[in-house]
Image (cartoon, rainbow, N blue to C red):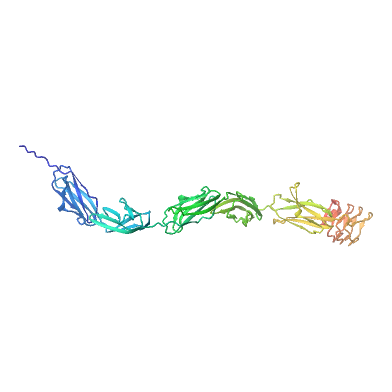
Amino acid sequence: MTITVQAKKQVTGLSIWGIDRTMCTEDVMFATVQVEPADHDCTQWQYYSTDTSVFDVLRGEVFEDDMGRLVLPVESYAAGTANLVVRALDGSGTECVHTITVQDAPTDLTIYTIQELPEGSNSSGFFAFNPPDALFDVCEVIVADTSVANVTYDSTNGDFVWYAKNTGTTTLTVFAYCGNAMVRGSCTITVRDRVQVESIRIQGVAHQLYVGETAKMYYTVLPEGHDCTSFSISSDKPSVADFDRENAYMDATRGHVIPVEAFAAGTTRLNVMAGDGSGVRGTFMLQVLAAPESISVTVPSEIVVGQSVGGSFKILPEGVTYDDCQVSSTSSMLDVQYTNDGSGEFTCIAKVPGTAMLEVLVRYGNLSLRKTVRITVVEPVYVTSCEIVGLKPVMNVGEVLGFYLACEPEDHDNDHWSYSCSNTNVANFSLRDAYWDDSIGGQRVPVTAYAQGVSEITVKAMDGSGTSATWRIVVLDPGKVKKFTLPDNLRTIDAEAFMNVPMEYLVVNNGCATIGERAFANCGGLLIAEIPASVTSIASSAFEGCSNLTIVAPTGSAGHRYAVSQRIPWLESIP
């Protein structure tokens, strides 16, 4: 008989199956030892816990399964972490280390859900353990009376949903199992009759909006305890205005808030319908107004310091309505006066040189439109000289002439003149009757001669330059003027010869050579004195006291020189 002795097959690998790496306290789980190779010859094993206060192997209950594998019952005691070590005692030194964490088992649980629902509705819920991180093996969620409600449970996340079927009250219970331990929590749930919506009121939106405007609408529903969970919103004419459904939200105070957008001028009805079958609907009539599109501003781009210039604006399209309008300046260089009377007119007052921005701001609804215009404020160009043109020095009663001003420089900025007349009974101007003259490209002011005498018209620039012009007019009444003509043979007019003699028009004869001292003194009514070239000597006091006198004499003559020296108005001839 032959006997064969084979070499002992040692263990080359060990692994532990059938036990999680976490356990609940006071639980028993079974660890199956998987050995390689399967036909090993090891018959002795060492197994132990590195911390027996956490868990340990129940050595008296170790057994082999029907496949010959070693099965180790492991019992947990307290929360903590320890290693389960299994070693083959065949001299190979092969071992397996399996870490196991023991956590507390739940001691109680709390259910969180809405405990009262109307028929046909549902509510989600969840439950929480104490301690919060407690482990469990399996949970059950049940309803005591399934004719009142039923429940579904999602074991993956621990959430449940209970469904209200018929009015009544029942109990919802959660069972949680962990090893040999079990905890339970329960709550009472009630199914009641549904409370339908009785009224819906839309608020928050003005009855008028402008195109492009957005307003927040909210609606309140009565009674407050209604069970409606869905509402439909609509606009009869969404092209005019409609709800911005994407930006709807819930407000803690006002409830359902939905923006409303205005698109085109017109009228539409906004609707909110309850989705509970009650048929209740809230409505709101909304008018959308055409909005201002642009602003047209008319105002000079350049204004002189000290000037007040009128301007105006139009809001387009014409006839469009708006809430408010303001006209202002962004700089102290320019003051703006505007009364918002609907005329669109305003006044700009230039203060100091520089550049300012004029702004017209139109508000409508919660929108606004603005237009800015650049205005340059410049130093004024003053009038340096002016002359009255178009009048005659001598006019007849009833004669009318028009005058204009010739000023230097021509591009001066003075736009206001002061007009005065020394004797309006003799001759006067009429600004009201001023007229346009194409030949001069400007206005002429008419002057009318009313009565015999002397009148002076003065025009003064009001630009602060002090520049003025004066025109002296002698008015004669051809049918009534008293001419005093000296005889042809008179050669010398003696001193005081005609002093205090009433006369209006003096004609010195051709051939007269000398006019003596005070020869015509105090002839206050004397208007014209014609002095021929034959006169070669005139005493300085010859016409003393003749305040209205104008001398008519040839250029360069003694009469001419006398008029200049005595500052008496002079004419070479009467026009």
Q: Nearer the viewer, residue 324 or 552?
A: 324
| Image spot of residue 459 (x, y percent) | 75, 55
The number of discs equals 0
The x and y percentages for residue 298 are 63, 50
Residue with the most extreme top position: 2
Q: Nearer the viewer, residue 295 or 385?
A: 295
Residue appearing at x 55%, y 50% in the figure: 266
Q: What is the residue that sits farthest to the right in this orientation?
A: 489
Instruction: Work out which quarter of the rendered image holds the N terminus and state it.
Output: top left
x%, y% of residue 39?
A: 15, 42
Residue 240 horizontal/vertical position (percent): 53, 49
Q: Outermost residue, left direction?
A: 1
Towards the viewer: 438 or 481? 438
Viewer can see residue 109:
no
Which of these two is toward me, 438 or 258? 258
> From where the camera sits, is residue 527 visible?
yes
- On the rendered structure, is 145 left or right of 520? left
Q: Determine whether, in the image, residue 364 is placed left or right of residue 528.
A: left
The answer to whether 222 appears left or right of 498 in the picture is left
